[in-house]
Image: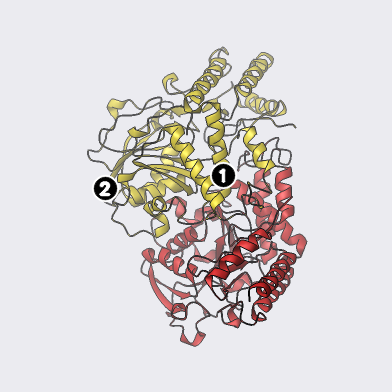
Chain colours: A red, B yellow
Amino acid sequence: MSRAYNFSAGPAVLPEPVLRQVQAELLEWRDERASVMEVSHRGKAFVECAAEAERDLRELMAVPDDYHVLFLQGGATTLSALLALNLARADQTADFVLTGHWGEKALDNMKPSLQVNVAASGKAGGYTGIPPRGDWALTPGAAFLHYTPNETIHGVEFHDIPDAGDVPLVADVSSNFLSAPLDVSRFGVLYGGAQKNLGPSGLAIAIVRKDLLGRHGRELPPIFELLNQAKNDSMFNTPPTFAWYVLGLVLKWLRAEGGAAAMGERNRRKAANLYAAIDGSGGFYRNPVDPAARSWMNVPFFLPDEAREKAFLKEADAAGLLGLKGHRAVGGIRASIYNAMPEAGVQALVDFMADFARRNG
Amino acid sequence: MSRAYNFSAGPAVLPEPVLRQVQAELLEWRDERASVMEVSHRGKAFVECAAEAERDLRELMAVPDDYHVLFLQGGATTLSALLALNLARADQTADFVLTGHWGEKALDNMKPSLQVNVAASGKAGGYTGIPPRGDWALTPGAAFLHYTPNETIHGVEFHDIPDAGDVPLVADVSSNFLSAPLDVSRFGVLYGGAQKNLGPSGLAIAIVRKDLLGRHGRELPPIFELLNQAKNDSMFNTPPTFAWYVLGLVLKWLRAEGGAAAMGERNRRKAANLYAAIDGSGGFYRNPVDPAARSWMNVPFFLPDEAREKAFLKEADAAGLLGLKGHRAVGGIRASIYNAMPEAGVQALVDFMADFARRNG
């Protein structure tokens, strides 16, 4: 075995016990005499597996009964386009608070389907913090307020939930799904791709307050109508069965590890360790984000110059620390430290950083 | 090992050598020191894997250079909705020839986005054949003509390509992808979900004549704009990486087995064997489809009464012949005998059928 610590932003590290179980039962799943990839999504075994995953997710996130939990094709970008069609009439306005790239992308994909208002944007500040609440230009009676609680590229995270009054909050939680406890009842919709904190790519989750669906007044293709998925236990069409199954195993692993509360504690420690290494490096490593808005999941940082960043990435890779290259939009280094990244992985990175700084400072 | 012969309609049987390779390299893929599920879709290794799959698909199907090959999220139903938005203006008409359930479903999902004309339908005849060509009420200058070359539920298949003149043919080939040689240049679009002949569920393929994209005049969410996927090697967003990887392995298996020509021969023999067993049963087994339109992929058949169908399914399952229950829309038995179903599996079914008929005739 030469598995390394994988800091990729997504697709990302999965819990090793989950991968071992997938491997062990890949050719014969349960009593099916076939791979989980080969069985009908309408067969008893897979329907049970799918329902288990929904039950576990509801329990882990304490999802109230008046919310649908949908397992859908695609990722957050596809879902943002679908949510715009499903949550509002074309003449209604949605507000956006932008704190990074993914908020912009959601706006781009929602804009053709409704009226949009950028209530606040951190762009002018290089997405290094959250625009002050008092400056948000919210639309009275907006259909919803969209934001991205954790921005993976710039490493900006909300550590509380904005108060939007009666306007439903719609939040892309792709990169912080189940990374800490979250009060689902404060949201209209929580949605995201699975491939960062929950499973493989190709599956997206939407947790939707039931009263928000079916009021858009549009004639949609039935496959775009989320109410059809809600009425059919997310099997209105053939779902991505393998990804759903793996996500179910990840949820069982999360339960065994102590759930959202334990993850929150562990992720807080991991992030604190890494930011302390950056801030304690005497300026050799630098993270530009407002400390109050620093992400626990994605930690971007910079070295004094690009030559040393390049050397850092090369040596880190050789030392078994993978996927650390920053997003091309911002450059530098980025460590994604999702739920499945163990504390030992972060410690290995911190140790490497100290050694590299000593040799190159 | 107690893997059985799996006649499921989809998700469906995969080649066992493919599953064994997936299993062997599940925790460490190539030199990545991580699972294929865990690596970035933008990393060198996965980009190579993705490009290999496209090259192999192009070679296996002899796809001309003026066609895009797109690897997309979702299944055929999602794609049908997207194709309606991408291939025509809202005021243009698309013609439909309906030979079963999936053609109807494509119509339902395209209808909200353009004008539709049902040029021909086999519904009145219970979808047991292809409406005579002379009776098709085609629209001059239609944006495209949509049909479903193989209908999995009713077991109706076109064994030649309809002539639509200059009107582009758009065909859902989910269930007969690479089941036999096909002249791609006769089509505007070939599309389908992977989960029957090509791989796991959660991935769809579209082979699109390049000049057909970008002329719809709509303002679409960028994620719905197929031209964006075409320009970004199907990585406009995070693709379903694991499904793409497995599909790549299936394509390599298909090449090793002799490609579309060899598959066509093998599938013809498998279907001939099974239909001979039905037709030679003295009426105990019955397939209602016009012999000229019988499917090589999905063979539905009926016993004299439901009680014996129930017994048949139970005993077949115990004999290691799985997934034979007919679709709820038609009942009875259905054997799906896609590329990965070996001839020995069909022979085992044929032997079982003879024995069951002897004991229950």
Left/right placement of residue A250 relative to residue A209 reads right
Q: Position of residue A147 (x, y in %)?
A: 51, 72
Q: Sequence-wise, which precedes: disc 2 or disc 1? A: 2
Left/right placement of residue B120 relative to residue A269 reads left
Q: Position of residue A168 (x, y in %)?
A: 51, 73
**Disc 2 designates what residue?**
B92
Q: Position of residue A185 (x, y in %)?
A: 61, 72
Left/right placement of residue A352 relative to residue B60 reads right
The amino acid type, in three-letter code, at marker 1 is Tyr
Q: Quadrant of residue A268?
A: bottom right
Q: Vertically, is A215 above or below B167?
A: below
Q: Estimate the spatial distance between the alpha carbons at disc 2 and disc 1, rounded to whole Å.
A: 37 Å
Circle 1 chain: B
Circle 2 chain: B
Tag 1: Cα neighbours inside 10 Å, few (<14), some, or many (≥20)? many
Q: Are marks 2 and 1 in contact (CB under 8 Å)?
A: no
Tag 2: Cα neighbours inside 10 Å, few (<14), some, or many (≥20)? some
Residue, x 42% and y 61% (percent of image)? A85
**Disc 1 designates what residue?**
B245
Q: Quadrant of residue B101?
A: top left
**In front of the other: B35 or B263:** B35
